[in-house]
Amino acid sequence: MHETDQAVGGPDQFSDPEAVAAGVPDLDRLLLAWDALDIPDPEAARALAADESVPDIVRRAQILARISPWLVLYQTTCQSLGSMTFAEAAELAQDADQEAIGDMGDGYEESALALNLQIERLRWAHSNLVASKGPTWNPPADLVLGSLEGVIRVIEAWRVVYQHAGQRGDELADGTPAGALDPELLRQGYHRIVGAVDQFGEATLRAQAGETAD
């Protein structure tokens, strides 16, 4: 349990993987961003960047992973101090995602990339929750983790609509092309969510009966 079974951010999810990779800032520019954001421990960042035992693109991922939490913290702090509403923050996030993706002239590809961002965020949340939970018995955490796995699967199925041009069919009432969702991903998502809820219910009953985990 607690595995999404797919490669993180697989390059096949992008229309032109080489162009996307080429657009990632190099290590020198990432270190400048680290300094500009006043993130602690710049020497540790430089040590990561200089570690030639790790491929360059992986070192960039390592630096970006350490910058990302600070960006989230800075953003949420500013939103809170600025008294932004949930709706305002949601609109800001949507606009920012669209600006990052750019105008590709193809609504399907843009939607697929936008959904990819949401999936990666959910995977990030999933990984953090797994680490926070640890090996202990924790029914609420297991409920959240199992549900996240299911939601990831459902969004992946939704994204299939936009990944396969040959599957573009008549649109449903909600704008989704008919018959394009991947039934296996939908099935996995459904069963993971239901399974997590069932396990939580069983664990709650055991706790009420005074039982503990084996």
Image: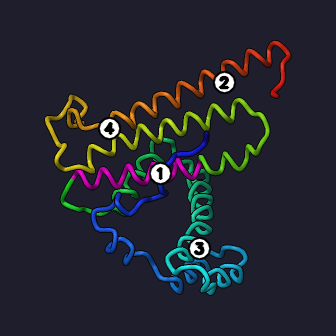
Mark 4 vs mark 2: in front: 4
Q: Residue at x 16, y 47 (%)?
A: 166
- Majority secondary structure in the magenta region: helix
Residue named by callout 2: 200
Q: Looking at the picture, does residue 180 appear above or below residue 75?
A: above
Residue named by callout 4: 182
Q: Residues within 10 Å of mark 4 (few under 14, many from 20)?
A: some
Provide residue 64's location: percent of width, then percent of height.
Answer: 55, 70
The reply to whether discs 1 and 3 touch (Cβ–Cβ < 8 Å) is: no
State the SS at label 3. Answer: helix
Q: Residue at x 48, y 53 (%)?
A: 120
State the SS at label 2. Answer: helix
State the separation of the CA atoms marked 2 and 3: 37 Å
Label disc, if present, on residue 6 of the rendered structure: 1
Amino acid type of disc 3?
Answer: Ile
Mark 4 vs mark 3: in front: 4
Span colored in magenta: 107-125
Tell me which corner region of the image, top left, top right, bottom left or bottom right, holds residue 1. top right
Q: Residue at x 32, y 51 (%)?
A: 112
Q: Residues within 10 Å of mark 3 (few under 14, many from 20)?
A: some
The reply to whether discs 4 and 1 touch (Cβ–Cβ < 8 Å) is: no
State the separation of the CA atoms marked 1 and 3: 23 Å
